[in-house]
Amino acid sequence: MTVTIAVRWPLGRYHATPWDRSVNEGAVEWPPSPWRILRALVSTWYTRWPELPAPALDALLAQLAEPPLYRTPPTSPGHTRHYLPDIDHVSGQSGSTDLTFDPYLKVPRDEPLLIRWNADLTDDQRGILAKLAELLPYLGRADSVCEARLLDPDDTDALVEPDQTWWRPSRDGQQLVRLLAPTAPVQRAVLESTTVETRKQRRTQPSGTHWIGYSRQEPQRRPTVRTLPNQTLVTTIRFAVASDAPLTAANGILLADEVHRLSAKLLDGRRAELLGSRGATTNHQHAHWIPIAAGPEPGARVHSLVVWVPAGLAVAEVARLIQIHSVSGRRGDGYEVKGLPKVDLLLQATGPVDQVAPELTRSARAWLSLTPYLPVRYPKRKTLEDYLTEDIRVEADYRGLPPARVTCLSPEDGLQDRWARGYRRRRLAERLDKARRGLGLRLEFDEPITGPLLLGQLSHFGYGVFIPEQRQEKCRE
């Protein structure tokens, strides 16, 4: 049997920061994670129904241990900005304030979120769950006021058969997200743990929890791009790069960053799926600006620029992007960015990435660095192997990929190898001290995966590009 709860937000806003994210990243946990939902039920028991015997609650939680399915209403992101005084602020004086974001999702007031468990509850357990849902004051942050109810088995929404637009534990859908869930059997102590306690244990997530990948197919009522009959989805644009002076792979990021800057000017607004602001916020579905060189050597000549947008491009956006015909490092004040000569961009192709950039999309188990991988997280006191394995695991998980076995191609060089030192590892406006550490890696997955495979810092600007390993030849010297 199934159990379904319907949740509405009468104020039309849902606030919830994912466990491993900062509020200033602008990320919103959607749908609400299994851990958040069960934790909310425990909190409601403590504050609104303490008379319920603890064993009865524990038995209910055990029945709800299996991750649920979700049918989500359409949403749109938003945020407000607040300048909050810090410890140095003096009342009546300006300054000493910190910018804080308040991200949220706008949700329809009359369309519910459906949460469905495959659970066989007794009549008593259904009664307990129905009352806890009725007493639930909010789901998400405290200002996410909600109305929740347990649906009767013959309710119309309870009889809806889940289709491919429902979120379910899987990595096969068009849209991917990872959610925190308690590990079965569910322990109430896990759901009662606080952020302070978790930090004292030097953990990045509560003990007794794990991440689950959820996916779904994009609902037809919310198409990612406007398509015409028999129209091939455009996710990729490819330009040939022509210049008198060579543009080398070491400076490819300058080309990527400059084209990104010009694209932002040409496009009206900043659609998150195209220009993005932080990779993890969009699950890295926004644009990647990938310089393609003749080889992995820093001095190899860049011959192509691939613009890859996993979320897809609208026809009008393609039309604007192909208006970029040339770029250079020359500025109006006479200054010239070293390493970025005048470059002509010649349109070669548009279409699906496997047709436009086939060298990035072959299927393989083993992958080698084409450009240096720039780790994201702080190494702390881990060994180099453990640190890189964990960093790659998190990066792969954000993209809905399984973990991989990681081999450092030059382990004797440590966290920054000689090959990576030959590359400019910072963006146009960044100083030399902002250069990231980088190194070459070999990744091996248990099963073949299909590219493109781009991981790590600046992966949207040409770093962390991996290509299938070729047995007949070495990818880099």
Image: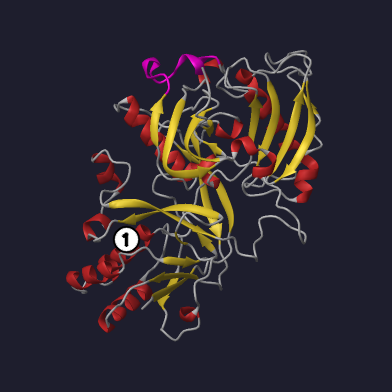
Rendered residue at 39%/66% (across/down): 68
Q: Is residue 201 left or right of residue 134?
A: left
Q: Is residue 219 left or right of residue 43?
A: right
Q: Is residue 370 left or right of residue 114?
A: right
Q: Is residue 68 left or right of residue 293?
A: left
Q: Front-most of 333 and 336?
A: 336
Q: Which residue is mark 1?
A: 39
Report if residue 304 lies within the magenta region: no
Where residue 407 sits: x, y (%)?
39, 28
* Residue 345 vertical position relative to residue 17 in the rendered view, above or below: above
Where residue 421 sits: x, y (%)?
51, 15
At mark 1, the secondary structure is helix
Q: Is residue 96 visible?
A: no
Circle 1 Cα neighbour tier, 10 Å, few/some/many (<14 / 14–19 / ≥20): many
* Residue 263 vertical position relative to residue 161 in the rendered view, above or below: above
Q: Front-most of 225 and 57?
A: 225
Identify the coloring.
Answer: secondary structure
Where residue 332 sits: x, y (%)?
79, 18
Classify the position of the N terminus by image quarter: bottom left
Q: How many marks?
A: 1
Rendered residue at 64%/32% (across/down): 290
Where residue 427 sits: x, y (%)?
60, 24
Q: Is residue 142 visible?
A: yes
Rendered residue at 66%/38% (across/down): 357
Outermost residue to the front: 472
Report if residue 417 lies within the magenta region: yes
The kind of residue on which mark 1 rests is Arg
Q: Magenta stretch?
A: 409-422
Rendered residue at 41%/71% (across/down): 116
